[in-house]
Image (tube, rainbow, N blue to C red):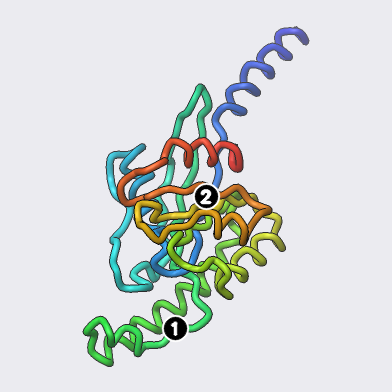
Amino acid sequence: MQLFRKFIQKVFGNLFKKKKHVRLGLYGPPNGGKTTLANRICQDWLGEEMGTVSNIAHETREIQIKEQINIKSKGKELTFNLVDTPGIATKIDYEDFLKHGMKEKDAKVRAKEATKGVIDAIKWLDEMDTVIIVLDATKDPYSQVNITIVGNLQARDIPVLIVANKMDLKKADIKRVQEAFPQYDVIGISAKNGQNMDQFYEGLFTVAG
């Protein structure tokens, strides 16, 4: 009877080991491509998109969650809830929205919503098992926002994968991102056209699996 119980525990233990469920958060500055990456992941594994993509910063002003995404690679399996967060910014000015043709009243509302979104995103860090930092590889990674995000994650000891996004653009420079954050794995992708997504998923298994 005892041998049978051990056998059952071993079988079911292996089953649960194979199917690990985690909360996976997408973090980064505005317009880095978080929602584009979220949509790419959802399209690849669910056949549907997650959210609206826009050239206007802070289009994502609320936490968006897509549950039960199951990915497979080389015999491994990972199930997670994908959490797309608003872009982190140290300053949000309603005047920035006026540049995109918004009326002053609407711009002020947008700025208020975006500020709340940033606060919520930081709060949600405590709920994350793994975080993907999505950076625009054409921009200088040594920004106050990026250093703040990384500092928060290091303080919480949360596993991190850094994505250098927009590698399809000429100005993209993955080396700058790698030099800025040598303590983390950095994978260069283009979420927009699906470039290097296989390597991204492999990297995901490494940090979250």
Name the residue located 41 percent from the left edge and 40 percent from the top edge: 197
* Residue in front for this viewpoint, 137 or 48: 137
Q: Is residue 165 above or below residue 124?
A: above
- Mark 1 element type: loop
Label located before the other in sequence (1 or 2)? 2
Residue picked out by circle 2: 24
Residue 33: name its quadrant. Answer: bottom left
Three-letter code for the amino acid on which mark 1 is drawn: Ile
Q: Is residue 47 above or below residue 89?
A: above
Q: Is residue 59 above or below residue 48?
A: below
Residue 63's disc number: none
Quarter of the figure with the C terminus: top right
Percent x, y for residue 25?
51, 54
Percent x, y for residue 166?
39, 56
Toward the bottom, the furthest residue is 104
Residue picked out by circle 1: 92
Left-right relation of 75 to 98: right
* Residue in front for this viewpoint, 56 or 7: 56
- Mark 2 element type: strand
Q: CA distance from mark 1 to mark 2?
A: 26 Å
Name the residue located 38 percent from the left edge and 72 percent from the top edge: 58
